[in-house]
């Protein structure tokens, strides 16, 4: 177990709201944080910068993954955190519903979604966008994020580049080899991959 001091946590909370723009008024409302899973140190940053935080139990999420996006829409969440599997599972469950049974969602409020569990699968992110862009989810808001408990959880986020490499070459030969140069794109591209 890693030990984290109040000073170390506060130092991280001072830095990350500026990077994620959660200390800025967005569309007339303050930062609203929503996490699918237990409360973590980084999630408490919403309170640090004067916003609100909502947290969903893992059991509730697994029972009804679509509840996650319904709550994001209803609470007007601006900053969201979930493990990678949540993105793929939610997209699959939403698309499995008959169109008439799908909830009406407005995800235009979302400004930043942390996808923070290893591995982050590009397919899950792409399926999530495909399922929810018609609900107003802006392209370029899902960010793979990496953390270490000994570094007070948050290490890096807001990466703007997707790089698809040959997994076998990386694992066996320890060589980074691009799979397809066409797959190299920035998250700021409106078109996506």
Image (tube, grey):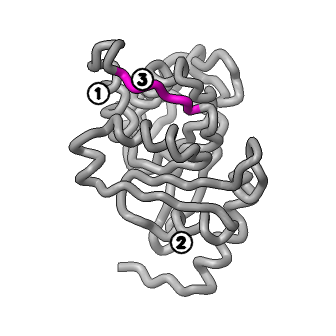
- Judged by depth in the image, the label closer to the viewer, 2 or 1, is 1
- Label 2 element class: helix
Q: Which quadrant holds residue 69?
A: top left
Q: Which residue is mark 1?
A: 93
Residue 137 x, y percent position in the rendering: 57, 28
Q: Residue at x 65, y 41 (%)?
A: 111
Tag 3–tag 1 contact (CB < 8 Å): no
Whole-number angstrom distance, CA of label 3 to CA of label 1:
11 Å
Few, some or many residues within 10 Å of mark 2 (<14, 14–19, 20+): some
Q: Which mark is residue 151?
A: 2
Q: Residue at x 55, y 63 (%)?
A: 154
Tag 2 or tag 3, which sits nearer the N-term? 3
Q: Quadrant of the N terminus?
A: bottom left
- Residue 14, placed above or below residue 135: below
Q: Which residue is mark 3?
A: 127
Q: Which residues are magenta?
A: 102-107
Residue 83 x, y percent position in the rendering: 39, 48
Q: Is residue 118 left or right of residue 31?
A: left
Residue 26 x, y percent position in the rendering: 74, 46
Whole-number angstrom distance, CA of label 3 to CA of label 2:
31 Å
- Residue 158, placed above or below residue 54: above
User: Does the segment drawn in magenta span residue 103?
Assistant: yes
Q: Is residue 126 visible?
A: no
Q: Name the main secondary structure of what is drawn in magenta.
A: loop
Q: Residue at x 42, y 66 (%)?
A: 39
Q: Which mark is residue 148?
A: none
Few, some or many residues within 10 Å of mark 3 (<14, 14–19, 20+): some
């Amino acid at each position: 177990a890693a030990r984290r001091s109040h000073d170390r946590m506060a130092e991280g909370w001072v830095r990350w709201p500026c990077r994620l723009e959660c200390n800025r008024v967005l569309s007339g409302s303050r930062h609203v944080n929503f996490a699918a899973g237990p409360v973590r140190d980084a999630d408490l940053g919403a309170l640090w910068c004067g916003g609100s935080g909502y947290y969903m139990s893992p059991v509730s999420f697994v029972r009804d993954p679509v509840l996650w996006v319904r709550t994001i829409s209803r609470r007007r969440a601006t900053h969201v955190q979930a493990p990678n599997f949540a993105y793929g599972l939610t997209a699959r469950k939403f698309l499995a519903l008959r169109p008439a049974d799908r909830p009406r969602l407005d995800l235009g409020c979302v400004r930043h979604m942390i996808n923070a569990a290893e591995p982050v699968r590009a397919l899950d992110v792409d399926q999530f966008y495909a399922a929810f862009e018609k609900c107003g989810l802006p392209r370029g808001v899902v960010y793979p994020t990496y953390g270490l408990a000994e570094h007070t959880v948050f290490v890096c986020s807001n990466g703007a580049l997707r790089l698809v490499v040959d997994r076998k070459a990386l694992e066996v030969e320890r060589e980074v080899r691009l799979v397809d140069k066409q797959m190299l794109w920035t998250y700021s591209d409106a078109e996506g991959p």
